[in-house]
Image (cartoon, helix red, strand yellow):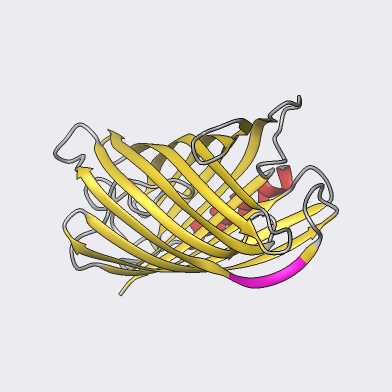
Amino acid sequence: MRIGALRFWTAVVCGLAVAPTCVSAEDGFDTEHIFGFMIGTDVGNPGEREFQTQTTGRFGKGGGTYRALAQEVEIEVVPLPNFRIELGGTASWHDITGVPDIDDRRQFNFQGASLDLRYRLLDRERAPFGLTIAAELHGDRIDEISGAKGRMYGTDFRLAFDRELVPNFVIGALNLIYQPEWARFELAGVSERSSTIGAAFGGLVRVRPNVLLGGEMRYFRQYEGIGLGELSGQALFVGPTAYFQLSEQSRLTLSWSMQAWGRPAGTGGNLDLVNFERHQARLVFGVNF
């Protein structure tokens, strides 16, 4: 845990040292991409197009060695005011050895595709807070956790709120999350349904015109069945986030989270390493074109 945090903050310090100082801050914040695992309420201006790469890492289970990386490539367009569309494709790499209830594997595969739709209901510049509804639909041939082959479908529904707590200096955001999932695994021939609900809070402070630093706290409860049936487990993740506006056209977001508390259903302990990972990390790079 300490090594992971040290590496993250080393990257942040290096970024602060090399980040360009000629980029000036606009009035207020553009929250579309400044968070790591969360989303803001801004969706861009009509006619904008962006290319984005997103790398997500998951590390550590209840035993053995567990490392999983997902590399997603995305194209974003804003065809109408307050409405954004994003298309993405994901490749994944798994290195799993000796983890209970997960087969050993070391593999790289094309995982699947996704469609992300967002609509902003309230603009915080004209309302007390910003409000956006989002739905990300995905279809996969590889399970993102175990790496097993099959057919996986799911949706990530979110309500996103944000508000400038101190104008042009401090921004806060809240996400309410519901994630129903359905999977049928190829070798086992069994189907599984699950659902996750959660709430996430994040805050960022502008430390330089082109640099924001802060953190995110996310709480999840996972259930059997898509209708929130029997509780499977719960976990709380906390960690730092850093955002760099590299130029007028490009940006970089770094985020790392550790499981600070968790509990699988029916057992004790302070962590849930059955349904969740010990560490999660994300790096997002985007450019307008």
Residue 259 seen in the figure:
yes
Residue 76: % across, % down? 33, 66
Q: Is residue 110 left or right of residue 6?
A: left
Which quarter of the figure is the N terminus placed in? Answer: top right
Residue 210: % across, % down? 36, 55
Task: Give above or below for 126 relative to 39.
Answer: above
Task: Give above or below for 202 relative to 246.
Answer: above
Judge whether residue 109 is colored magenta: yes
Q: Is residue 222 left or right of residue 202?
A: right
Q: For the point 61% across and 57% down, which residue is it?
A: 184
Q: For the point 24% across and 67% down, which residue is it?
A: 48
Q: Quarter-wise, where is residue 244 in the image?
A: bottom left
**Which contiguous range is marked in magenta?**
106-110
Residue, far left: 126
Foreground pick, 285 / 46: 46
Task: Give above or below for 16 relative to 111.
Answer: above
Q: Is residue 123 left or right of residue 245?
A: left
